[in-house]
Image (tube, grey):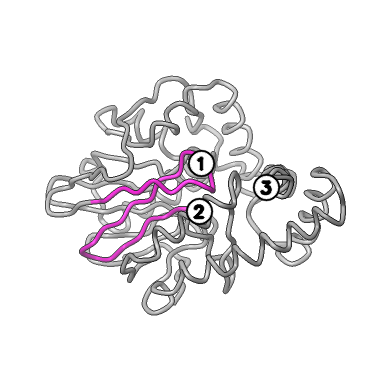
Amino acid sequence: MRHRTAGKVAENLWYLGREESGVYWLEGKDGAIMINGGLAHILPDVRRQMRGFGLDPAKLTKILILHSHFDHIGVIPWFTRNNPGIEVYGSAETWRILQMQKAIDIANQFSRTVADKMGLGAALQDVDFAWRDDIAGTTVGDGDRIDLGGTTLNILFTPGHTHCSITAYEPVRKALFASDAGGIPYRDGSFASANTNFTQYLESLEKMKPLAVDYLCADHYGYVTREEARGFIDLTLREGRKLRARMEGILREKGNVDEAAKAMNVLFYRECPDYFIAPDILEGVFRQMMRFLEKNLQS
């Protein structure tokens, strides 16, 4: 079953935000962690929902970044500037990227672009959402654990969507926080967003496949429960293989990366006109994917 509205997911676990972007609040005996940073424009929704669900901001002691893309770090600056005691976790590559001024500028620009596309640009007015050089944190990687007191998140390195992608797994609830590395539950399917390396993306899915999952906690389009959650990684694997074959076919037909990316983008929005990412941004993603596939086909 798919759930796309904010609310309680399981005991001490909540989904906050909007359909196109959300974050997760997980509580343990020693405090709460926010998993994922979402899009910047969901901040007013998140703050309102926290009040409505009785979630105490003072309990928030940790934030976990699952990867460094702009649509997964948006609310973090506001929370860390309003509570400097929050410890922020991310992979080593995430911290390297978020120290680059060019990456920060792109993230801030894309946050505004998507907010405008969703008709929510006003939500960013008078909000200090922009990333600057004042946010640092703790590095976590494959095999590490984050302890909340009676609740533990196990960290897996799951590259392919990005070089910096990590996944968190909470074994008691059987909750998987794979971000886009696990697939995006758009409509009734799964978009296998293998942005940087299709081979690694599929390998990361195979790595997650043995995990028992009752809650597939995605960053876009909500979370998935019950039997559908148990089969979601398999679904993404199937969709990923189909998407790769389709993109390779377009690349062979067009003969160059730029034309293939444009053609793929046109096809995608013909089928998915309400997808939350602006077309010019996603065309850049498809171009990145096509570059990898071109190199792979030539090798």
Q: Nearer the viewer, residue 137 or 121?
A: 137
Label 1 to label 2: alpha-carbon separation? 17 Å
Q: Which-is-in-front pick, marks 3 and 1? A: 3
Which residue, given by chain and number where applicable, does mark 2 sit on? 180
At mark 2, the secondary structure is helix
Q: Which-is-in-front pick, marks 1 and 2? A: 2
Residue 210 image point, x, y percent: 35, 66
The residue type indicated by label 1 comes to Ala
Residue 52 image point, x, y percent: 32, 57
Q: Residue at x 32, y 32 (%)?
A: 139
The residue type indicated by label 3 comes to Asn
Q: Residue at x 37, y 59 (%)?
A: 15
Q: Nearer the viewer, residue 206 or 274?
A: 206
Left or right: 85 in relation to 116: left
Left or right: 219 in relation to 282: left
Q: Is residue 174 magenta?
A: yes
Is residue 79 depicted above or below 160 in this figure? above
* Magenta stretch in the rendered image: 153-179
Give the numbered dot on residue 296. 3
Is residue 11 depicted above or below 293 in this figure? below
Q: Quadrant of the N terminus?
A: bottom left
Earlier in the chain: of badge 1 and badge 2, it is 1
Q: Residue at x 25, y 55 (%)?
A: 54
Disc 3 crowd rating (10 Å Cα; few below 14, some 14-19, many 20+) is: few
Q: Residue at x 69, y 45 (%)?
A: 299
- Answer whether labels 3 and 2 touch (C-beta < 8 Å): no
Give the numbered dot on residue 133. none
At mark 3, the secondary structure is helix
Q: Which-is-in-front pick, marks 3 and 2? A: 3
Is residue 172 depicted above or below 24 in this figure? below
Figure label count: 3
Which residue, given by chain and number where applicable, does mark 1 sit on? 40
